[in-house]
Image: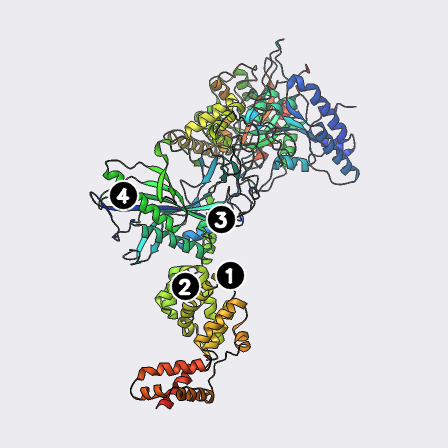
Amino acid sequence: MSSTATSTYRIQGATGEWEVVIGLEVHAQVTSNAKLFSGAATAFGAEPNAQVSLVDAAMPGMLPVPNRECIRQAVRTGLAIEAQINKWSRFDRKNYFYADLPQGYQISQLYHPLVGEGSLLIEADEKAGIAEDKVIGIERIHVEQDAGKLMHDQHPTMSFVDLNRSGVALMEIVSRPDMRSPAEAGAYLAKLRQIVRYVGSCDGNMDQGSMRADVNVSVRKPGDEFGTRTETKNVNSVRFVMAVVEAEALRQVDLIEDGGTVVQETRLYDPDRNETRSMRSKEDAHDYRYFPDPDLLPLVLDDAFVEECRASLPELPDAKRNRYIAELGVPEYNAHVLTAEVETARWFEALLSETAAAQGKSEGEVAKQASNWLISEFFGALNKAGHELADSPVSHEQAAELLALVGKGTISGSIAKQVLETMIETGDSAGTIVEREGLKQESDSGAIEAAVDKVLADNADKVADYKGGKQQLFGFFVGQTMKAMQGKGNPQVVNEVLKAKLG
Amino acid sequence: MTDLTQLGVKAIREGVAGGDFTAREVAEAFNANVAAAQDALNAFIVATPEKALEAADKVDADRAAGKPLGAMAGVPIGMKDLFATRGVQTTAASHILDHFIPEYESTVSQKLWDAGAGMLGKLNLDQFAMGSSNETSYYGNVISPWRRNDGGNAALAPGGSSGGSSAAVAARLCPAATGTDTGGSIRQPAAFTGISGIKPTYGRCSRWGIVAFASSLDQAGPMARDVTDCAIMLGAMAGFDPKDSTSLDMPVPDWAGSLNADLKGKRVGIPKEYRMDGTDAEILGLWDQGIAWLKDAGAEVVDISLPHTKYALPAYYIVAPAEASSNLARYDGVRYGLRDLPQGANLQDMYAATRAAGFGDEVKRRILIGTYVLSAGFYDAYYTQAMKVRTLIQRDFAAAFETCDVILAPTTPTASFALGEKIDDPLAMYLNDVFSVPASLAGLPAMSVPGGLNKDGLPLGLQIIGKAFDEQGVLDAGLAIEQRAGFVAQPGKWW
């Protein structure tokens, strides 16, 4: 399965070059109002133990009942990575004792996962050192329960348990050991996050723990067999995943070159010191005594269910990007930026449709302009005002109105910038602001001629220079005229008048 | 006035509905019997006379108001203390559930209350339903009301794990009781005490709110004086429950209304593999008698083979402990029940201390067995192998039911034994389940009905095993035997 695209990433050791081999197990919390096997709610940030059902607390005699929506979201995610959907799957119990695990076992899927083989494409990124597009294999996706959370800082001698997260549905997305550099691992995780957010199966909020990765790393001399791997648990950002790969690979190379051997073990990442450290080794690893959960029947999906999941999938990022480029004529760079986050793409598409309608044009005719404006003007202005797209004070309807004013020549591009700033500040519509502040572009050649005449009269010496051959002074006259008209002169008309007057 | 405690479910329901007596009078009479027998029999872990009266008064009021009465209206029952009952301690007869008072009601018990039944109390049982003699309860042994006719006063086992249920019904402390059956825990105690009990098809009764022993085997069922009472009560207990993923989404037939002891056209299978060494000669004799009774009822008798029967018991004692070892992991001292927190203990120490103190020997034994058979390196040799055996046993039954409608067999290899006789020999104790376990592994409905007394004056039971979902066939055959056996013996009251 392993993709054979070569990576140039190598660690230079004392004994030569080393290649790093990476596989990720990503835990993604399923977006659902209720937990995997109970009716309890799942919202982030609730009071401790406010979202705990009798099932989640493992009271005697309580039984799990699978939540259809969680299964649906995992199937949709599987379809989005073009994976095999297993119409017959089964839940297994993973047995171990811990205070955050009320049942004394986690309901998971070891033997028969819901989703089988799939794959995901990471794109070439020269800057990051990814030479060419690369397909990363995905071995499986299974669904399982999350555990609760222990709180050690609430009492001097006791630990507290918050079971709000206990029983929340997770997808565990297991990659093949197909990645060969920190950049590839980072790109894989970013791409996976992009896909689940498009699909809507996980919010991808890594800082809230909705998505976290166990990073499997080993090193080998290029061409050798796989080395012994370590697993660094619960890494919660793309940046940290890349840092873990690098730190862990370097540690392993140093260890081996110093005559040691890598031990198969679970490790933890310490971001403050940028190093991993041993959590437990294989010797004291748990024997989880997996066996089929006798409280649950095998999960059998019918064709209609799978087809509904497929039909409900949105356009995915790769397809969307290609369509932007091929069908809408959006520049490639813009297409990348606009499809990176599903919210951005949604915003762009709404803006596009409003803009086309407002100007009576096709989307293809306005797409390039709208994409340029969104990326080079709007994002910057929002950012400057401390906003993000999600909390933009300017709606896409309002933005479309602004673009239409520019398109119709009512205001100039430079005035539009000023209007946009005011829109962000006040939330008022572009039309209102233009009207109120008298920003309408002056296209009347009489007024422009008067302004030009004055500029030429005031700068007789420069006119003489221009006529003497200093053609580059044309821009100066344009600038002076626009300044005199407080930016409201229609640049095209100004140009024409100046050209005529200067002969 | 008649002794109301001699009446069964149907007679009480009809008497209350017809105004012959009030539900309160019935409840009071049984409450008195419960109280009088407690010291001698120890059938109840806790009596709830006020609950019985409260339910009775509601039925009496409903009747006075002309409201329709439920299938169990006015019938006070005993509730095996494995069913969660809201506001009433639920112990599974284990120290580890000390002071556990659920805030929820099991589906089955709620259905019974909704049908008009009242609760006399929570019945003793083997700890976590693990045992065949009711000697593993933290709350002490249940003493069978039966005694041998040899003049000795040896305390006998009421069977297990539903030993409180069997003793209470046999001693007329309640007209009926709930039981649960994992490998025979309804049928074996029923056989030991001369009463009837049915384990329905797996999934008929919701497991929601029943303290789990082995999830793939546990089934609730009624234990009562006769087949008709079992049919009535099972009808009130059964039904689809969306809270139990293994619940059967099927309508509940009117078993009681459809009872028919005429077996013309029915074929009764006699499995040759059940003629095992070590089976009591009197039991084999009763089996032959049972065959004659069913022929007399019009049935055709056919020989059948269940070739994998001998593997059923070992497979059961792998599968059930495996599930139990996991199901009982939740009793960890963290959230409810017993907590033993020694000075300076860490989490692991607390687990160890709590579970060491909280679980009895038999429970620990099964957790150890279950943990072992699921361990890396042993899983395939034990658990996987046992699951294969389970499939073969299911196939045995499926093949047999090609040629017969029900199967007749003994319920147990022996009559009741003396307390203490087998408790130190787990294997001898496990052999008690040899005839009951195969139907459990196959998830089939099976019942025990009393057939007669042995030479010691102790009851013996006959077992009828049916096709999946065919409780009716089982009950009908049971009724045919009941009518011919004419079993009316009761334990002499010595308490």
Closer-to-camera residue (B302/A343): A343
Looking at the picture, which amino acid does disc 2 mark? Leu
Which residue corresponds to mark 4? Answer: A219
> Pointer 1 indicates a residue of which chain?
A
How dense is the environment of label 3, judged by Cα within 10 Å: few (below 14), some, or many (20 and up)?
many
Where A369 falls versus B297 (above or below)? below
**Residue A298, percent from left and from top:** 46, 42
- Tell me which label, 4 or 3, sits earlier in the chain: 3
Looking at the picture, which amino acid does disc 3 mark? Cys
Q: Distance between the residues labelled 4 and 2?
A: 36 Å
Q: What element carries label 1?
A: helix
Closer-to-camera residue (A471/A110): A471
Where A215 falls versus B152 (above or below)? below
- Tell me which label, 2 or 3, sits earlier in the chain: 3
Q: How far apart are marks 2 and 3 (CA)?
A: 29 Å
- Tell me which label, 4 or 1, sits earlier in the chain: 4
Where B38 falls versus A333 (above or below)? above
| 2 or 3: mark nearer the eye | 2
Residue at (35, 65) in percent of width and height: A333
Which residue corresponds to mark 3? Answer: A70
Q: To which quarter of the image does residue A55 belong?
A: top right
| 3 or 1: mark nearer the eye | 1
Q: Is residue B435 visible?
A: no
Q: How far apart are marks 4 and 3 (CA)?
A: 37 Å
Of the numbered discs in the image, which one, if any, rests on residue A391? 1
Same chain for the residues under marks 4 and 2 in the image: yes
Q: What element carries label 2?
A: helix
